[in-house]
Amino acid sequence: MTATRSHIVRGFTATLLARAIYMGSTAVLMLVLARYLLSPDAYGSLFWVIGILSVVQLAADLGIGKAAARYLAEYRTRDPGQIPHLLRATVSYKLVVLAVVAGALLVAHDPLAAALGEPSVAPFFAVGAVYVVANSFAGFSQVALQGFNRLEYSAAVQSGTAVVRTAVAIALAAAGLGALGAFLGYVAGAAVGAAIGLGVLYVKFYRTHEAAPRFEPGLPRRLLEYSVPLTATRSANVLDKQIDIVLVGAILNPAAVAFYTLAKQITDFALAPADSLGFALSPNFGEGKAAGDVTEIRTLYRTALEHTLLLYVPAATGLAIVAGPFVSLVVGADYADAVPVLRVLAAFVVLQAITNVTSDGLDYLGRARSRAIAKGATSVANFVLNLLLIPTVGIVGAAAATVVTHTIYVAINLQIVHAELSLPVREIAHSVVTIGAITLAMAIAVTLVAPMISGPITLASAVALGGAVWAVLAVGSGLVDPGVVRRTLASV
């Protein structure tokens, strides 16, 4: 195993562990809030407000953090003396923008709630001013640490955020503060994440690099210029992930938001490994391109893509098959309306898994503008489809809009990667056909036993059967080499 691959494995392991803590904490929070502490209406209202604040956060974050990460990755080897200048400039830019956005939110929280037709959520927006600031710096510190390729620190930010958020949200909701108490948990988690991340950046990187006599001429301008396409991409990402929730709440009702949000949260749990792999892999794209080593990047990306498809195509298929008993047994019959949404979003799981191992790498390859154009166009299409389908089809329409538009986005991303890396299309296509055959066999096995699912044990047995069929066929087909797996695990 090359040093690069070994570093990626270690980074992936740290990120996956943090993601596991994050998703485990989120799962506990989701189950406790949905099943015991909040009604569907209150649960929906909570995540409707968070969706709206995520849109507000676009103006607070712009693309400055991701742009800084790109240049931190480049200059940490090229000219480390620029690191303090980059960090200081980025934080200064963010403070100016955050002061404007958070101040406006604090002043206008009552009129905003009234304009949205929900005056009762005004306190959420008032507290939301603090949430936007804390969440912005927590997110910035994560991507900046990714730029330094020190994913263990980025993982600590994510883990700390999740654990504190879950503990505080449950405690305050249980104490009688309801949805507002749960939201205060989100604020506390973001604040702790920001404190950890900024502290690590200061102690481990800002203070340890001797600043160059001056900022490299033109670098501040390039930083801001590169943030423009990243702002567009981030805006499109947030619109894709949150605008459907906002529209469901505006067009339908809070309970519909609860059902739709629950289905999306379940897909988020499934996407943790791909998210971790993409986060660990992407900084190496920029380093490899700077070194002129396209062959290594091509091999890494092909391996990541094929193994992502091998995991996620069968997993998403199995999720669609057992969605009904899974929701009923885990969350409760009150959320049965989430089942058809989850079945549609199973296709999105595959698409987003591909995106997770692809899109961040494009930013590090310098193709942020191309990705921004594609993301912007498909996000607008998603918004329009949501407006058309939610009033007629309901929350299933929102899920369908997400799948259709994301299919187009993934196709464009793959084309951009191919243009940069000249992927071996024929070999990848052969692997895809093999994965399809494995998925079909697994789906038949799970479908045959699905009618027998009546409780947690039979549900776990059905999942285990599907996993066993997948494992045997994956090894038998040669797509998984047990020896390589053992050596990789031993190197962690």
Image (cartoon, grey):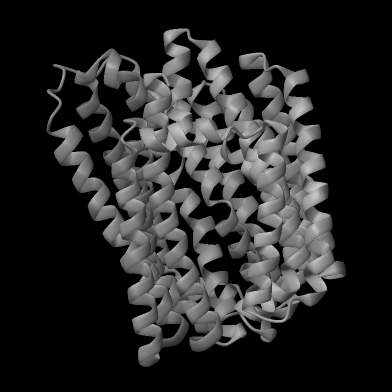
Where residue 15 sits, quadrant-wise, is top left
Confirm whether residue 70 shows in the render: yes
Of residues 243 and 286, the one nearer the viewer is 286
User: At 36% from the left edge and 68% from the top edge, which residue is drawn?
Assistant: 165
Residue 278 position within the rendered picture, expressed as x and y whole percent measured from the top left: 51, 37
Q: In this view, which residue lies farthest toward the bottom?
A: 176
Image coords of residue 185 (percent x, y): 36, 72
Q: Classify 257 as above or below 356.
A: below
Percent across and percent down for residue 176 are 39, 92
Q: Quadrant of residue 68?
A: top left
Which residue occupies 61% across, 79% down? 331
Of 308 and 97, the residue lying toward us: 308
* Screen quadrant of the N terminus: top left
Query: Is residue 307 toward the left or the right of residue 391 in the image?
Result: left
Q: Is residue 259 visible?
A: no
- Residue drawn at point x = 64 percent, y = 65 percent: 245
